Image (tube, coloured by chain):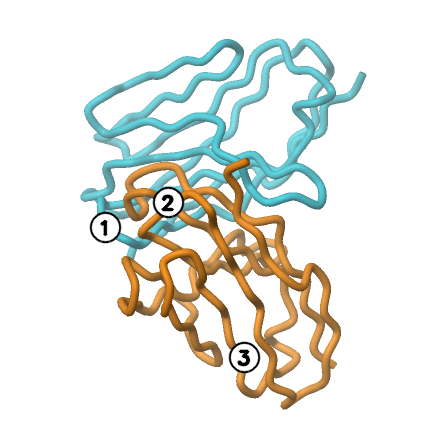
Chain colours: A orange, B cyan
Amino acid sequence: EAQVTQNPRYLITVTGKKLTVTCSQNMNHEYMSWYRQDPGLGLRQIYYSMNVEVTDKGDVPEGYKVSRKEKRNFPLILESPSPNQTSLYFCASSSNGGRYEQYFGPGTRLTVT
Amino acid sequence: GENVEQHPSTLSVQEGDSAVIKCTYSDSASNYFPWYKQELGKGPQLIIDIRSNVGEKKDQRIAVTLNKTAKHFSLHITETQPEDSAVYFCAANTGGFKTIFGAGTRLFVKA
C-alpha cells in the first residue's frame, strides 16, 4: 500500500529537549515536505526537499532542521523545542514538487510544555 | 509572497444542499490549484485539482472553477452527504516547490 508514515503520532515534551519526528514514504517520490497546521492558519510549509541531499526553507523554518540522506526518509528535527512549536505536523511527498498531488502522512501532534 | 485567502471558515448545510467554498490567490504566476479534504484525525487528501489552462473541472458531485483574471477559484459540492463533513483546504502553486494553503473551511452537513 502506497503511504506516508510518521512517528510518533503523539508527543508531549518539555522546552529545550531535542526531538525528531520521522517521516517515510514508499512511493519512490523525489519530493518531500513538512507542514505545520495551526487553527485559523491552515497548513504552513516548514521545509521541503527536492531530492536526496537537497533541501530548502519553506515559509516557517525557524527552529526546525531537516535532513534527506535517503530518498524515502525525511526527518524533522527540533533541536530546542519551545511552546510556540506546539502544533500538528504533517509530512507529505509528491512525484513532482508542488505541481502534482501531495500525499500526506497521518500527522504528529506535538505539545511542548 | 504568495497568499491564499479562503472563505468561509465554517459552513453548515442541510444534507442534499450544495456547498461552495471560495479562494483567492495573490501571485498571478500560480498555475496549479488543488483542493484537499481532511477528515478528523487524518492527513489531508486530494479530492480535485485544476490547472490554469482550464476554467472548470468536474468529478461526480465535486467541481472546481477557476477565474484567472480575478484570481479566484471555488469548490462546489452538490447533493451533500454527511460523509462530506470535513475540513477543506484550497492551495496554490506557481509550478515550483512551494505550495501555499488557505486557512481551511470546516464543512458540516446536517442529516
Give the labeled residue for mark 1.
Answer: B96
Q: Amino acid at mark 2?
A: Ser
- Of helix, strand and loop, which one carries label 1? loop
Q: Classify A103 as above or below A10.
A: above
Circle nearer the N terminus (3, 2): 3
State the residue position of label 2: A94
**Residue indicated by mark 3:** A78
Label 1 crowd bin: few (<14), some (14–19), many (20+), radius 10 Å: few
Position of residue A7 measured from the top left corner of the image (x, y, whole percent):
63, 62
Front residue of this view, candidates A33 and B18: A33
Which residue sits at x=45%, y=38%?
B90
For the residue carrying disc 3, how many other residues have a C-alpha within 10 Å: few (<14), some (14-19), or many (20+)? some
Q: Are marks 2 and 1 in contact (CB under 8 Å)?
A: no
Q: What is the three-letter code of the residue carrying label 1?
A: Gly
Left or right: B51 as drawn, with respect to B91: left
In the rendered structure, the answer to whether residue B55 lies left or right of residue A92 reads left
Q: Which residue appears at 36% of the width and 58% of the height?
A: A71
Q: Quadrant of residue B59?
A: top left
Q: State whether residue B2 is above or below residue B21.
A: below
The disc numbered 1 marks a residue on which chain? B
